[in-house]
Image: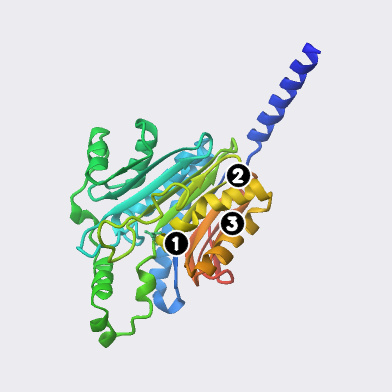
Amino acid sequence: MKYCSLLLACCSLLFVNSNALSAEPRLVIHGGAGTIAKSDLTPKLEQAYLDQLKQALHVGYGVLENGGTSLDAVSAAVVVLEDSPLFNAGKGSSFSHEGRNELDASIMDGRDLSAGAVAGVRLVKNPIKLARTVMENSVHVMMAGSGAEAFARENALEMVEPDYFYTERRWQMLQRAKYPKEQTRIQPVAPLWEERKMGTVGAVAIDSEGNLAAATSTGGMTNKRYQRIGDSPIIGAGTYADNASCAVSATGHGEYFIRANVAHDICARLMYKKIPLQQAADEVIQQKLVSMGAKGGIIAIDNSGEVVMNFNTTGMYRGKIGPDGLEVAVYGEKAVISGE
Ligand code: ASP
C-alpha cells in the first residue's frame, strides 16, 4: 500500500512536470482602450503606435524565450511602454487638474498570489519596477506618494525630475479637458471625454513552466483631482494573476472597474463557473460593465495559454506574441493589423 502511494506520488509529479515543461510561452499587451477612430490618428502616428507595441512584445517575449519567468516578461514589456511618450504611463503620462503627473502601477505573480502596487508617485521613472520592488522587498502590497518614493530611493530605483514626464500632447489634452468651451470653438470636443481615460498600459504572460503574471501602469485620467486613484494599482480591479485560473490587465474608466472588481471577477468566473476565458471576459466586459455604463477593456491569458483581448470601446491598442507569431492592432476586432 505504502509503495503504491509512493508510485502514485511519483507518477503525479512526473505528470505535473511534463505538463509544466510543455507550456508554450505567450505574452499579451495593451496600450489603453477608448474611442479610437482611424481619423483620430495620422498614418505616421498609427505606425508609431504599432511599432512601439511590437517592440514591447519582442522585448517581453525575448525574456520568455530565454527561459525567463512570466513576471520578468510582463515587467520588461511594461517598461518599454512606460518609456515611450506615446502611452499614458511613465514618460507619456497624463496631467492632473493641477498640472502634475501622478503615476499608478501594479504587478501580480500567479504562482503564489504575491502582489505589489504604487499609487500617486511623481518622481519614479518606472512605476512598474517600484511595484515589483514593493512586492519583493517589503512586507506590504501597496504604497503611495512620498512614502513610496522614499522606498524607491532606499531601493536605488531610478528617480527623475517631475518635468521628465512632460509631453506637449498630454499637456494639450489637459488644456482641452479644463477649458472645453474654448476647445469647441477650435474643433469638436467629441474625443475629449474618451481621451481622459486612454493609454494605460499592461501585460499578461504565461511562461514555459505554466506560471502566470500580470502588470498594469498608468498616468490615470487627464484632469483628475484630489489625488484621485483609479483601478490600475488596485489588485483585483486593474490587475490580477492566479495560476489556478488566469492573469488579467485592465484599462478603462477606473471608477467603474474598481466597483466591478474587473480583473478578479474574470478569474473568479473561470474558477467557480468553469467557463472558458472568452465567455468570462464577455460576461464582465460586454455585459456587466456595459450595464453599468462603463467603457474599457482587458487582456487576459488563462493557465492553458488561451488568450483574450476584449473591449467595449471602438478600439484598444493591443498585441500578442507566441509560438504562432505576432499580432498588433488598434481598432475593433475586424481591423486587425499583423506584422512580424
Ligand atoms: N484605468 C485607468 C484609470 O482609471 C485609465 C485607463 O485605463 O486609461 O486611471
Whether 264 is drawn above or below 244: the answer is below
Q: Residues within 10 Å of mark 1 (few under 14, many from 20)?
A: some
Q: Tell me residue 260's x, y (percent).
A: 49, 57
Q: Name the residue type under label 3.
A: Val
| Kind of element beneath mark 1 | helix
Dot 2 or dot 1: first in sequence order is 2
Question: Which disc number belongs to residue 245?
Answer: 2
Question: For mark 1, what is the residue?
Answer: 256
- Name the residue type under label 2: Ser
Secondary structure beneath disc 3?
strand
Look at 63% across and 53% down and name the residue there.
277
In percent of width and height, residue 91 lies at 29, 55
Within 10 Å of the Cα at label 2, are there few (<14), some (14-19), or many (20+) other Cα atoms? many
Question: Neighbour class for label 3 at 10 Å: few (<14), some, many (≥20)?
Answer: many
Q: Is residue 322 at all visible to an observer of this figure?
A: no
Distance from disc 3 to disc 1, alpha carbons, whole Å, reads: 21 Å
Residue 89, percent across and down? 34, 56
Nearest-to-viewer mark from 3 and 2: 2
Q: How many marks?
A: 3
Q: Which mark is residue 308?
A: 3
